[in-house]
Every structure is written in C-alpha cells, then in structure tokens.
Image (cartoon, grey):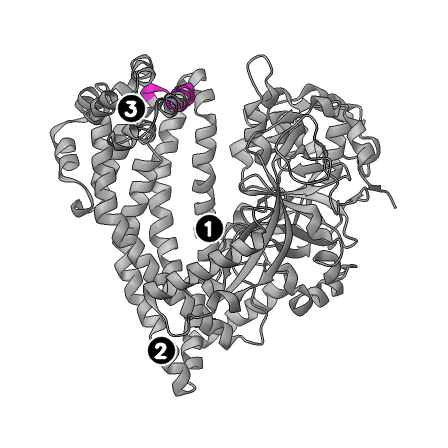
Amino acid sequence: MKKLILFVFVSMLCFSSMAKEGMWVPTLLEKYTIEEMQQMGFRLSAEDVYSVNQNSLKDAVVIFGRGCTGEMISDKGLLLTNHHCGYSAIQSHSSVEQDYLSNGFWAMSQEEELANPGLTAKFLDRMEDVSDSVFAGTEQLEGDSLQAKLDYNIRRIQQQASEEGKYEAIVKPLYFGNQYFLYVYQVFTDVRLVGAPPSAIGKFGGDTDNWMWPRHTGDFSIFRVYANANNEPAPYSEDNVPYKPKNWLPISMNGVHPDDFMMLMGYPGTTQQYLPSQAVDMIINQSNPDRIKIRTAILDIFSKHMEQDPKVRIQYASKYASTSNSWKRWKGEIRGLNRLNAIMVKEAYEADFEVWYMQNDTLEEAYASVLPQFEQLYINLQPYEKANNYYQEIVFKGIDIFKLAENFPRNDKGWNRLDGEKQGLVRKALDQKMTDYFDDYDLGTDQELFTELLRLLRADLDQSFLPKEFTDLLAKYNDEKLIRKVYQKSVLADASKLKEIVAEFDSKAIDKLQKDPVIKLYNGLRQHYQQNIERVYQDIKSNIARVQKQYMKGIMAMEKNAQLYPDANFTMRVAYGKVEGYQPRDGVEYSHHTTLQGIMEKYQLGNPDYIEVEKLKTLYETADFGEYGEDGQMPVAYTASIHSTGGNSGSPAINAKGQLVGLNFDRCWEGTMSDIMFDPDQCRNIMVDIRYVLFIVDKFAGAGYLLDEMDLIRE
C-alpha cells in the first residue's frame, strides 16, 4: 500500500509540474523554469522578467500597502490593484455626504486625486542570495547562540543595504532557514486615490461569492504614485509630480482564451508545502474543525441579529465578511486535503525519506531523529494548539467588548512617564478608537457573543487551561446573571460613560478601569493564556521549526536534482499556468470565463450581495460595450491553473507577450488547500479581465482620459 501511495504521490508531483505548481524566485527562473515557460508559449526571456542590469517586468510590480500586490500601468505613475486592497483608503475618504464606497470615486484630473497618509508602494530594487553572509561564523554554534549570531549578521546586512535610509532592506529565510535572501526596496509614501468603482461592482457577490466560481466581481481600484522633482520618494506635497517608473505594463485588448499561457508576478503571503504528516493531520482533524466550530457559532449570532435589525446588518456586515472568509477557506481546505488523501501521501513521502537517509551512516546520523521528533512534538502540541486556537478565536477576536478592553493600559507606570502633550495624544487616540468601536457595535449582539463563546471556552478546554476565577464565575451565574453582573456593570458597554473617562484619562482612570468587571475578566484570561499556554505553545513551535529546518535540509539533499520552490513568504515570486476551467464535482464542468450576462442573472436572485447598478444594466441592455466586448458579450472574469495565495491579490496576470490581461483577486473554493498541497485538477486562481476594468473606467465611469495614459495593444 505504501509503495502504491508513493507512486501516486510521485505521479502527482510530475502532473503538478505540468499543471504549473510553484511560486518561483525570479532570480532562479533561468535555472529552473524559463525553458518550460517558453515551451508553453512564453515569448520573453528570464532577463525580461527579472534583471538588475536593464528594465524588466519586476520594475512594474509593487507591494501595495501592507499585504497586496499592485502594478504600474502608465509612465505617469498610474497603479492598478484590487478594490479590496484599496478598500480602507476608499473608506477613509467616505462619509454620509460623499459615500465613495457605495457610489464609487473618480478623479477627473490629477488635482482631484486624494492623498492617503500611511499608504505605500514598494518597488523591488534588487534581491540576492546572502546565505553565506548570514551563516558566517555560525559553524560551531547552536541554540540561542546560533540565533543571536544569525540575527547579528542579518542586521548588519540590512543596515549596509539600506544605504543610510535610502532603501528599505530586509533579509528573509527560504526553505525554513536553509537559505537567506536580501530584498531591497524603494518606498514611495505619496500614493493617491484616482478611481474606484462602487462596491456593488468592486465587491459584487460579497460573502456569497467569496472563494467561489463562477465569479463576476470588478475587483479593482486605481491609484497614482507621486515623487519629488528628481523622481525620488518624498512625503506628500502639492509640489510632488507623478512618478515615472522604470517600467510599466502594456495592456492587451485581445482578451484571453482556453490554454493561453498565463503568468502572475506578485507577493504571495504564506504557503506550507513541506509540512510533515502530523501537521497535516492536525490541520484536518483538530485545528480547522475547532476554528470552524467557533466561527460557526459567531456567524449564527451575527446572522440572527442582522436579520432582526437593519442597523445591525450594516454595523456587522464587515465583521461577518471577515469572519466568514477564513471559515469558508478552512472548510474548503479540509475537503481538498481529504480528497487528495493528504495524510497518507505525506506518510508515504516520509517513508521514502526514511529509505533515503538509511543509505549510509552519515545521512542516518543527520536525519534519523527527524521523523520521531515530529511524532512526539505534535503529540505535545495538540492540547496547546487547541487552547491557543480557542483563546485566539474567542478571547482575542470573537468578543467585541474584550477587543475594546485590550486598548487600555494595565497599570499607570507607562502613563506617568509621559509628558502632558503625549498624554493628550493618548487621550485623543483613545477617543478615536472609542468612536470607531461604537460605530460598529451592537449591545445585544455582543452580549450574546459574550455568553455563548465563554460557555464554549469553558466546555471545550481542559480546566488547566482556564483561570479558576473564570470557571467559578461561569459556574456561579447563568447567562442572564452573567450579563447583568459582569457585562452590564462594565463601563465598556456604555459609550457616553466611557467617553467621559477617556476625556479625563489619567492614573486614577487607569486604576478604576482595572476594577471594571469586564476588564478584570479579560485581563485574567489574558494573563492565564500568557503564563500557562503561550509560552509552552511557542516553545513547542520553536522546536518544531528547528526540526522542520533539518527536515527541509534533508528534502533538498534527497531531491537535489528536482525543482523545489521555497514556500511563499511575501517576497516577489513568479507563478504560471494556463487559462482553463475545471470540474469541481461529478457531472459539473465550469467554463474558464464569465460575462456581464451573469451579473444580470444574479440580479434576479434578490440576494443582497447582488446589488443592481442601473447604469451597468443599461450598458448591458444596449450592448454598449465599445471595443472591450467580444462576440456580443462583455467579459468579466476568468480562471487559470496558477498557484496563488493571499498577497497575490492585485497581482498582474501577464500573457505570453508580457502584456497585462487581467488582475488576480481570489481562488476557487475547491482548491483552497493549495497552500498545503496543490491539486492540478481543482486549483484555480480567479482574475478580473482587464477589458472589464477598462470598460468600467471608460463606459461606466466616464474616466476614459485615464486610458490615454496607458499603452493599449490592439494587434
């Protein structure tokens, strides 16, 4: 049986290679993948993709904000990314009088573009392997001494590469610390909002369509990067001018078709392709089910109160969507991993690993302890993993009033060291946090979350993971008394009283708040977590990381002639595949693309996630698609077999000629296990067709002047 499973695994690896699994380091394309890419139809060279000697595609791709990708689409600094990536910036400019989220925003000149303090666009200047420099002087070290030396070497490399603040330099590990790369960025801080469609287009489908296909979301927004007169990064100033990038992407008007070569460049966040079987077992059978159970309880409470009160529906819409996002992904992940028999596949690979290291005494000495250590460490981790997930999901994320409690200091030591001006700034910041909190807070909803989730915490965790005061409290009071004696006695549940305290915030207020029943309960749970769970949990995870590094070293030695890509770590990667649909289950086959007709069909369903947009409907009914339509239809979105994950939001979809044809924004639900194991049959990324973007900008918004900046390729 193990031999059969191993054969299946090896076969799947080969097929996955054909299906273009992998997130590849751009500097290594020549070594590993460029030949295959060209065989698939790619017409550029590795040097065209990434170069430090000439302008290349990498110069047109940026880190947008804190966790997305963006791309330059004009020589005047025009930047394209997802609507959900630009959402907070759009929201920050919105008000009741000017609701840009609902109505969209379009600057009709550069003077109308809106500044966004804190928003950045980071351009990769260069990347290089600095493993030798990081490992210098560490040969005889281990444990804390080894880590201290590594940290010292990394700081020195980063400091030298930053050139006294001219660049942002960061060293990141690859292959679990068996290799290190330096990344040097030029960071622009004057990034202005140019345009965004209304949410009924930019977020069309909402939670209903999240992770799903067919998809019809116009998930894009447009910004502009500004620089000083020397084309260098500079703080916001009216004197700044549009940045002229080293490179920008030409835009193809010719669309996409089945089997077309397709490439993503961007900054994928996190993948875990090399986990041992015990880790995958824990994800499938403990971690994901626990988190799903908790979030199901939360979503049920949200739904109940949102259905009863339109105000609550608005207040909790964003919370529901963010809670549901991972909840839905975790479910898909379990389904996909089970479908692939992931645990058995991993066990078979580990059996092969064992056979490999037993070939000679040197290998056996280095690797014989790896798999047994994994076995014991994951047994040790199980109860702490459960406790950690329950505290994270319930205490730190699930109950709003606890999240509010986290904002207040636990003693006055730090407060007393602040001067009067800084104390005033703290009061102002707290007041703003209170305002933001109560804008999206409903007493009845959070009270039910408070009782239901605390009961769940008490019921599902071993008593050793809970403070005695907490268990005594829940044993003493039923839900009604728990609300009356704790929640309703808290000043945190009363906006007016809390704002009075914040207005006069001082040492006495800090002391008074520590006696508040909710803050006292929260602090007790938080302290117990830190002292009895977090430390042990992190110690075990550190030991797992140490063994994982050795395991990865062994895999790299065993597979020395194979193409092994490092897990994603929010550094620039290249992924590629082809345009294609898929079969999610027996008897169902999905096309590779959707059209505006599908939006009109969804309008008829009456789902609140499918809000009708009158002008879009008129454009459809009159077939006023301009040059953006194809065969009498208006293309909207499409899928491809490209390995992607979080962070790839906003990544440019690039065709065989190096032209922009789409904008990545999601994955299909059936393939969400791709962070752990890629399935060539089911893993599909979802992209908005660039023609739909241009159609909305031109025909819908009337901002066609923006297209004059772009290089539109029509042949």
Residue 116 x/y as whole percent: 59, 29
Looking at the image, residue 145 sits to the left or right of residue 320; the answer is left
Looking at the image, residue 118 sits to the left or right of residue 514; the answer is right
Q: Nearer the viewer, residue 529 or 337?
A: 529
- Tag 1: amino acid: Glu
Looking at the image, residue 554 sits to the left or right of residue 261; the answer is left
Residue 90 to residue 712: above or below = above
Q: Residue furthest bottom?
A: 360
Residue 673 lies in the magenta stretch = no
Residue 586 x/y as whole percent: 56, 52
- Tag 3: amino acid: Gln
Q: Nearer the viewer, residue 164 or 381?
A: 164
| Residue linked to disc 2 | 368
Indicate which label's residue lies in the foreground, 1 or 3: 3
User: CA gap, disc 2 to disc 1?
Assistant: 31 Å
- Secondary structure beneath disc 2? loop
User: CA gap, disc 1 to disc 3?
Assistant: 32 Å
Q: Residue at x 47, y 28 (%)?
A: 318
| Residue linked to disc 1 | 333
| Residue linked to disc 3 | 447
- Tag 2: amino acid: Ala
Residue 406 x/y as whole percent: 32, 32
Looking at the image, residue 277 sits to the left or right of residue 216; the answer is left
Q: Residue at x 55, y 56 (%)?
A: 160
Confirm or deny contact between disc 2 and disc 1 (CB under 8 A): no
Choose the circle earlier in sequence order: 2 or 1.
1
Residue 437 lies in the magenta stretch = yes
Start-end of magenta stretch = 429-444
Q: Residue furthest right?
A: 715
